[in-house]
Image: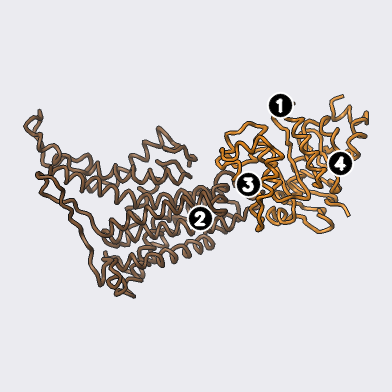
Chain colours: A orange, B brown
Amino acid sequence: MALLEATNVHGGYGGMNILNGVNMTIDQSDIGVIVGPNGAGKSTMLKAIFGLLHVNEGSILLRGEEITNAEPTVLVGKKMAFVPQEKNIFPSLSVQENLEMGAFSRKDDFAHMLDQVYSFFPPLADKRNQPAGELSGGQRQMVAMGRALMIEPSLLLLDEPTAGLSPLYMAEIFERIITINKAGVGILMVEQHAKQALQIASKGFVLAAGQNRFTDTGENLLNDPEVAKAFLGG
Amino acid sequence: MNELVFFLNNVVISGLVIGSIYALGAVGITLIFSILRFAHFAHADMMTLGAFFAFFLTAMFPAVGPAIGLPTAFVMLPIAMALTAVTAIYLDKGFYKPLRKHNVKPIVIVMASLGVTLMLQGLIRMFMGTSARSMYIDDRKDIYRIDLPFELASRPLVITDPQILLFVVLIVSVISLHLFLTRTRLGKAMRAMSDNPDLARVSGINTDTVVKVTWVIAGCLAAAAGTMLSLDVTLKPDLSFHLLLPIFAAAIVGGVGHPYGALAGGFVIGFAETLSVFNWAVLLRPFRDYLWFDLPSSLAIVPTEFKITVPFFILLAILVWRPTGLFKGKVL
């Protein structure tokens, strides 16, 4: 059974649909990457999956269970985590407190996850007591991802995890995403850097005007001249 | 020397007393603003309500205090705080939450809180009448006169029992609030929600619980402030009228959304008030022979009747020159 199965999703803000029938299937072993031009509904799709936006039509299933329009709090309980693109940290809270907030829904002891996140993102370990707002852009992204990992998610949604980062940090974040995926976390992310992202994608979704234009493996999409011409800048 | 004692009594002690009251109110306003993003105008009436709960309990069990050796109303304070906290939760449920559900603009909720203020005032008057009442029923207020060990000081420092208890309440409240916000899971969630409400939701923080906790804390602090003030002076149904402006000024001066700022703001406003109504002629009297002008008998910056204008001017000044407040809060 697929980890996430979105079928014919329509949705938007205040009655106006931005998504006009999007289909997506993600397995536990997948890194799914959503690319497409501005306004195609990439981030909107992630928000619709995470219950931050009303889905007017279609269905979203998590391991076969209906989660269409479920509250984020409920989805976090079902081991789904979301990292927004902007404002994805609590700036006045310390790094450690940010991570603790990610584990808010956990009633069990999560100390081992703190250690794991620190060993996974070593720069954070030294700065655990510093306010997260004082960190650099790349380190903030690590805090944001670390916070999401605290629930030990089975599906991680990332909205442009490399936005505004230097190429060096971008490569590092992509590397981390691959590691997280290999540990058994299904990944679905939106990326502006389409070419680099599709290189690590097992599944690529090219959206345009709120609909799937192309859906294939990342490699096939990269080699498809039509996709390259229309969406990857030649 | 007696002039200095007069200054200590009328400015330092009075300022500390009224500053503590303002601080307790302002911290509540600032917490509500940082979590719910609206200016809660009914806050001063929650203070009055808390005092009335304490009064009611005192009237019901007047013998409790004398048996312990503390003012009865003070012994009843925890119950009054609990009752006010529960009222606050239900006020939110009945009037503010439905509006939040409809995603209205903050100003609509501010207006609703004005309505709640009028409603609370009406209810309090309906049940308790309009006259001033003493919180001491079967006991009486202890007043301590502390003689200073200086030869020239023939007048004593005067401090009352409820004033000392007020300082105790303030110190205990501030320390427990600090520990709550920095050490507990819910306290950190409160700070997180104040920082970034959307991310709090995404992280799976139960925002309804955080909202409830905010009302509990604000209600408890309001009841404590109202009760302690009424113990020190008298309980009047129009108590809130004199408190609303100063506590808002204190919250804004401190930087909205900043609990420690509100604490500081409370004392800034409190001391500004006592300093401006203080009769400076008394302090200058020993030096009258050296002054180039005739010392009038009364020399205050603001006449006592116009004390309420002081926080108003401070509020205007801070909004013009430093709208984020002393501690860089959010702009209203």
Chain at numbered mark 3: B
Q: What residue lies at 67% left-to-right and 49% top-to-bottom?
A: B202
Which-is-in-front pick, marks 1 and 2?
A: 1
Nearer-N-terminus badge (2/3): 3
Query: Quarter of the image containing the C terminus of chain A?
Result: top right
Spatial CA span between label 2 and label 3: 17 Å
Q: Is residue B249 visible?
A: no
Dots 2 and 3 on the same chain: yes
- Disc 1 marks which amino acid? Ser
**Of residues A147 and B42, which is closer to you in this image?**
A147
Assess disc 4: are there few (<14), some (14-19) or many (≥20) residues with their C-alpha within 10 Å of its C-alpha. many
Which residue is disc 4 drawn over? A212
Q: Amino acid at mark 4?
A: Asn
Label 2 crowding class (10 Å Cα cut-off): few <14, some 14-19, many 20+? many
Residue B219 or residue A184, whichever sits in front = A184
Q: Which mark is residue B214?
A: 2
Is A21 placed left or right of B305 in the picture?
A: right
Q: Position of residue A42 (x, y in %)?
A: 78, 40
Labels 3 and 4 within one chain? no
Q: Which disc number belongs to residue B168?
A: none
Q: Which residue is mark 3?
A: B198
Left or right for B281, reference A164: left
